[in-house]
Amino acid sequence: MKRHRARRLAGRVGLYASVILLVSPALLFFLWMLSLSLKNELDNTAYPPVFIPHPPTLANFVDVFAKNDFLTYTINSVIVSFSATGLALLFGVPAGYGIAKAKASKAAALILIARVTPGLSYLIPLFLLFQWLGMIGTLTPLVITHLVITVPIVVWVMIGFFEGLPGELEEAALVDGATIWQAFVHVAMPLARPGIMVAMILSFIFSWNNFIFGVVLAGRTTRTLPVAVYNVLTFEQISWGPLAAAALVVTAPVLLLTLLMQKEIVAGLTAGGVKGG
Amino acid sequence: MSSTTATSLTARATRGPAYARRYWAFAVPAAAIVLLVILFPWVFTIFMSLHDWKVTGDIPFVGIANYAKMLRDERFLWAIVRTIWFTAGTTIAPMVLGVWAAVCFASEFKLRGLARTLFVLPMMATPVAIALVWTMMFHPQLGVLNYLLTSVGLPPSSWVYSSSTVIPTLIMVETWQWTPLVMLIVLGGIASLPQEPYEAAILDGASVWQMFRHITLPLVWPFIMVAAVIRMIDALKTFDTIYVITLGGPGTSSETINILLYQTAFAYYDLGYGSAIVVVFFLLILLISLVLLRVRQREAWR
């Protein structure tokens, strides 16, 4: 019995040690990012490095918004991500329902292929198309290309959720004379609300994080935040404080969303194994 | 209650091809979008790959010349080698760590929810922002990583500034970022396992390792496979991290297919050749995806 308890104890110690080992790279990274963004330039380039900002300063954040047009870029990012997510929900939720109900595995395969195709491979023809249409330099091409990411995510997550719903309620509605559209809107959709939530969050996050479409398609005034923050690097080589502050501004909404909605996000990711771009 | 069951049974009995067809209407708008922004680019890319297509000037039809060029293009062939090396690294390391993490997070412990959220943050954070912070940490003189290495007595590394360490370093960044996805998928698998085998094993005095090796691993193997294929596809597609941290450098020593593709199409504006690279790259990914689909379908629509 004593040996058994010793073994249990060793197991617990091993478990906690493992968790600390696994979590600390993430934790230390974000703490360092925060530390960089709160220090003045002198401390940021000091060697050995200064770990705790003393005193912490918000000057870097002020700097980011003062020197660059970050407010415009933030608005751009909000417009693009919200539109791309909204449109994806509008088209993707019914599509997910249709595919799940019809057990259309070929359509599901097409969506899957769309999800695995590298974003870059859409860009050459779409770039030309938008050039011909004279749309380069507006936000429309960005919204349209972001659909490449958001529609497959939404459809994929929704297929999973609608498959998991019991069909009896809708069938009862159909028998009572409802059209399939009514059965979808009034029976299936309310039941799938958690799924729609998951699809919305994931779609928003991956659209927000997208970099590659913006690099190619955005002009000076239509940059989204990830493109804008990359340009901070190019033009101000070693001013680390503002760069870290800018990086934090860009990723903060997503990190907050993850912290608040972790249950929903985990559910969606485990179901679909989704990643954008 | 019984009448509902009866009607649903008749409804089920009358299901036929017509039943499924009615639901196609739901997918029409999304199908239109897919056609416009996904299928059109595919078809047009194949068309472009058969031409000598620069941004300005004539666009002569050249047949498979772009594809033939690839076989002789050393830069392209090296990019393939690098992509394979990078993909192997960024698949194997996150798989091992991800399975280990999933086993840990499947156990009960204090602050598990918080620890899991922290662990998942790297994959949700904006890749560009993350890559910029890594770049600062890799700085050879002022970077915090070399400070940490030297303070424990190890020699400083040149990280992304030397052609021999750049790919391992990028693999480290990708592993840091994408291990959580593997963990989540495998954790989902572990959560669905029955408890009885473990109870029996504990009674028999099995060790933690024995339980992992003989119960967990075989039972969650399908999930591990799904995670591995997803990871492999995402690894092949890696762009943001490499583009931001090294832009394929130093020289071309971290130039993977995706980066070469970007350079060819949007730096040199050789759209025809770029399209041919897209087609080959896409076929490669398609092949892997088909494997994924087989694995997935087996569990979804039995």
Image (cartoon, coloured by chain):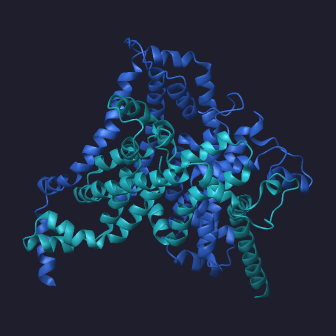
Chain colours: A cyan, B blue
* Quadrant that contains the N terminus of chain A: bottom right
| Residue nearer the viewer, B156 or B139 | B139
- Which residue is at a point 7% across and 71% down the rendered structure image? A177
Residue B293 image offset from top left, x and y in percent? 40, 48
Residue A138 image offset from top left, x and y in percent? 39, 41
**Extreme residue toward the bottom, this view:** A1
Q: In this picture, is A214 found above or below B176? A: above
Residue A20 occupies which quadrant of the picture? bottom right
- Which residue is at a point 56% across and 41% down the rendered structure image? B239
Residue A133 image offset from top left, x and y in percent? 32, 32
| Residue nearer the viewer, B163 or A250 | A250
**Extreme residue toward the front, this view:** A66
- Which residue is at a point 75% across and 50% down the rendered structure image? B137
Residue B165 seen in the figure: no
Residue A114 occupies which quadrant of the picture? top left
Residue B76 seen in the figure: yes
- Which residue is at a point 65% across and 39% down the rendered structure image? A234
**Extreme residue toward the right, this view:** B153
| Residue nearer the viewer, B214 or B235 | B235
Residue B250 occupies which quadrant of the picture? top right
Tell me: B227 left or right of A86: right
Residue A150 image offset from top left, x and y in percent? 39, 52
Q: In this picture, is A200 found above or below B282? A: below
Tell me: B242 left or right of A189: right
The mark tally for this picture is 0
Q: In this picture, is B270 found above or below A188? A: above
| Residue nearer the viewer, A261 or B12 | A261
